[in-house]
Amino acid sequence: MTDGIHPLSQQVGDHNFLKFNEVRSDVADRWKSEYPQDFLCEATWRMAREFGYENPFAPNAEMAGGRKELPPIVSVSRADRRVTRATL
């Protein structure tokens, strides 16, 4: 997040990254207002379901206002996700 591709290059991504000390859910969820239709492939939704997310665009999803709200973004430790170096 803060390094470029070689020692003399600029960082890749948000240049203000180091100014923030928390994840703001209102900013993290801002994309929802920009994408009223599903834009992810089935492989992505399969992976999302493994992390407990449901496709809010699915025809059988119970939606209010045409879309189902996704669960809030929260911090989950590697231990809780059962992620080890072997799985990375």
Image: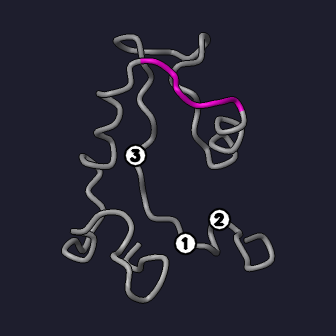
C-alpha separation, residue under disc 3 versus residue under disc 2: 16 Å
Q: Which residue is mark 1?
A: 77
Please, what secondary structure does the residue beneath circle 3 have?
Answer: loop
* Cβ atoms at labels 2 and 1 below 8 Å apart: yes
Provide the residue span drawn in magenta.
37-42
Assign the magenta stretch its main secondary structure. loop
Q: Which residue is mark 2?
A: 81
Q: Earlier in the sequence, mark 1 or mark 3?
A: 3
Q: Which residue is mark 3?
A: 72
Crowdedness near tag 1: few (<14), some (14–19) or many (≥20) residues, C-alpha within 10 Å: few
Q: Amino acid at mark 2?
A: Arg
Q: What percent of the width, then of the height, locates residue 60?
A: 61, 12
At 38% from the left and 25% from the top, the residue drawn is: 35
Quarter of the image for residue 31 reads top left
C-alpha separation, residue under disc 1 versus residue under disc 3: 16 Å
Q: Is residue 4 magenta?
A: no
Viewer-closest of 56 and 11: 11
Q: Amino acid at mark 3?
A: Pro
* Cβ atoms at labels 3 and 2 below 8 Å apart: no
Please, what secondary structure does the residue beneath circle 1 have?
Answer: loop
Relative to 7, residue 84 above or below:
above
Relative to 57, residue 83 above or below:
below
